[in-house]
Image (cartoon, rainbow, N blue to C red):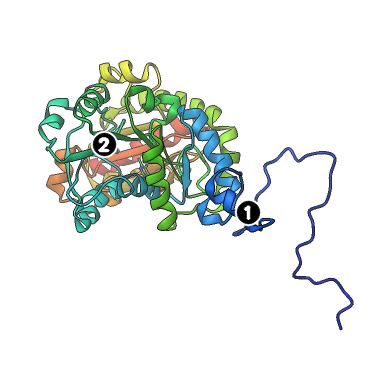
């Protein structure tokens, strides 16, 4: 006969007249309601309350509210990854027979979703050049239901003609979804430019520390929101409460990190452009950027934290650069607090033929930098050494 309290009964949370400054983490999968009437009212939406974590939990909601505030949205959803957000936005809204039109330089997995996965469900997709509104318009079909864009393309940092595409989408009743991961709401708020759906990989600079994988999707239309929410809950795109907690903590410093990364990026772009052996530098607010005027019109002075550049020389030059810049993490991601460097030809774009890469302007000497918050002198020293080593490797 047990004379100690059951260890299985949950101990009540200790009372405290003071409250924690930090956000609590709530990992509970399930919530106990007082009675069936209350549970019924919770499911009916007349009484607030959580039921089962796959359907929603406090850490996801706290994080979603913060991103909502940045984007000018309400009721945004935090999901288990950026790709979960892209998938829920598309598959929650589209049906067999619909056509989706994407930019031709979307994030690699988004391109794959459009070209490989959606067609298996009878949803056709095609891609067009989103920097060219006429080419984009020509690719619209009678059954086009949704357009998926990124404001700044990966990895060549070209600017979509958002104003023209948003106007044509609106005129034709086509939904416009914008993946705002690269630009962030600090660069542009897509709802103010005609977007119906805004998507983020929170994994990147919003969370900012490469330790949480999360996505976000928001819409101002409650019918669309419910369709996306139900698809995400049914297919189990639940975010981890701990990841949400990490990302929320990361957001406290988002604006500081973004601004510092951006001013570093602008300075680093100028430095790299001045080095011998560099063919070209791509940074949206530079005068030599192919979409400079559009960048200024859309983003003002906000060029963002991404810089791309092309070295003379091939793979040997690229290898020499990463080896001679050991303080710059050569890692296929972006948005980390520290600078990371990626080489599309050996990672995100390795599945393309060399000719297809060349058509996009991605040679073996092409790099994309996600600039972090380091001291700019450290960054110029590392890239200076890397580019000099690349040049030496090309000359031998
Ligand atoms: C990384 C990224 C994604 C995917 O996000 P995950 O969190 O890695 O699933 C989608 N779109 C863009 C633009 C990205 O950079």
Residue 212 lies left or right of residue 24; in this view the side is left
Quadrant holding the N terminus: bottom right
Q: CA distance from mark 1 to mark 2?
A: 67 Å
Determine the residue located farthest toward the bottom in the rendered image. 1
Residue beneath label 1, please? 37
- Mark 2: secondary structure: strand
Q: Residue at x 79, y 61 (%)?
A: 11
Residue 79 percent coordinates (x, y): 46, 48
**Circle nearer the viewer, 1 or 2:** 1
Considering depth in this image, is 217 or 247 the residue closer to the camera? Answer: 217
Q: Residue at x 25, y 41 (%)?
A: 365
Residue 135 percent coordinates (x, y): 12, 30
**Image height of 215 relative to 152, above or below:** below
Residue 7 percent coordinates (x, y): 78, 70
Residue 366 lies left or right of residue 207; in this view the side is left
**Image height of 242 relative to 328, above or below:** below
- Mark 1: secondary structure: helix
Residue 31: image quadrant is: bottom right
For the image, the number of numbered tags is: 2
Q: Which mark is residue 311?
A: 2
Considering depth in this image, is 7 or 309 the residue closer to the camera? Answer: 7
Any atom of ligand 1 within 8 Å of the CB at mark 1? Answer: no
Residue 252 percent coordinates (x, y): 60, 33
Report if residue 261 is visible in the image: no
Report if residue 320 is visible in the image: yes
């Amino acid at each position: 006969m047990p004379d100690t309290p059951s260890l299985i009964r949950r101990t009540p949370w200790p009372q405290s007249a003071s409250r924690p400054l930090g956000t609590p983490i709530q990992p509970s999968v399930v919530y106990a309601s007082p009675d069936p009437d209350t549970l019924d009212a919770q499911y009916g939406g007349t009484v607030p309350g959580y039921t089962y974590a796959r359907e929603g939990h406090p850490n996801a909601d706290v994080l979603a509210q913060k991103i909502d505030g940045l984007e000018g949205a309400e009721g945004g959803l935090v999901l288990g990854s950026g790709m979960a957000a892209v998938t829920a936005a598309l598959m929650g809204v589209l049906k067999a027979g619909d056509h989706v039109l994407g930019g031709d330089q979307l994030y690699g997995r988004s391109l794959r979703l459009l070209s490989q996965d959606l067609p298996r469900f009878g949803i056709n997709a095609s891609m067009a050049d989103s920097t060219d509104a006429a080419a984009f318009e020509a690719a619209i079909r009678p059954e086009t239901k949704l357009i998926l864009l990124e404001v700044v393309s990966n990895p060549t940092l070209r600017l979509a003609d958002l104003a023209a595409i948003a106007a044509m989408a609106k005129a034709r009743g086509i939904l416009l979804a914008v993946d705002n991961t690269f630009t962030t709401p600090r660069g542009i708020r897509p709802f103010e430019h005609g977007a119906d759906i805004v998507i983020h990989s929170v994994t990147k600079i919003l969370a900012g520390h490469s330790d949480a994988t999360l996505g976000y999707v928001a819409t101002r239309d409650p019918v669309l929101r419910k369709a996306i929410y139900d698809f995400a809950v049914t297919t189990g795109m639940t975010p981890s409460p701990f990841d949400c907690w990490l990302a929320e903590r990361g957001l406290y410093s988002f604006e500081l990190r973004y601004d510092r990364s951006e001013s570093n990026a602008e300075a680093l772009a100028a430095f790299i452009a001045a080095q011998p052996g560099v063919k070209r530098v791509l940074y949206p607010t530079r005068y030599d950027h192919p979409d400079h005027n559009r960048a200024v019109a859309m983003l003002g002075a906000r060029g963002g934290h991404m810089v791309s550049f092309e070295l003379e020389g091939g793979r040997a030059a690229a290898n020499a650069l990463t080896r001679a810049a050991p303080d710059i993490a050569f890692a296929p991601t972006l948005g980390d607090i520290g600078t990371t460097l990626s080489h599309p030809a050996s990672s995100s774009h390795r599945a393309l033929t060399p000719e297809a890469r060349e058509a996009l302007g991605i040679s073996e000497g092409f790099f994309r930098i996600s600039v972090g918050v380091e001291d700019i002198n450290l960054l110029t020293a590392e890239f200076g050494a890397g580019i000099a080593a690349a040049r030496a490797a090309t000359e031998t």
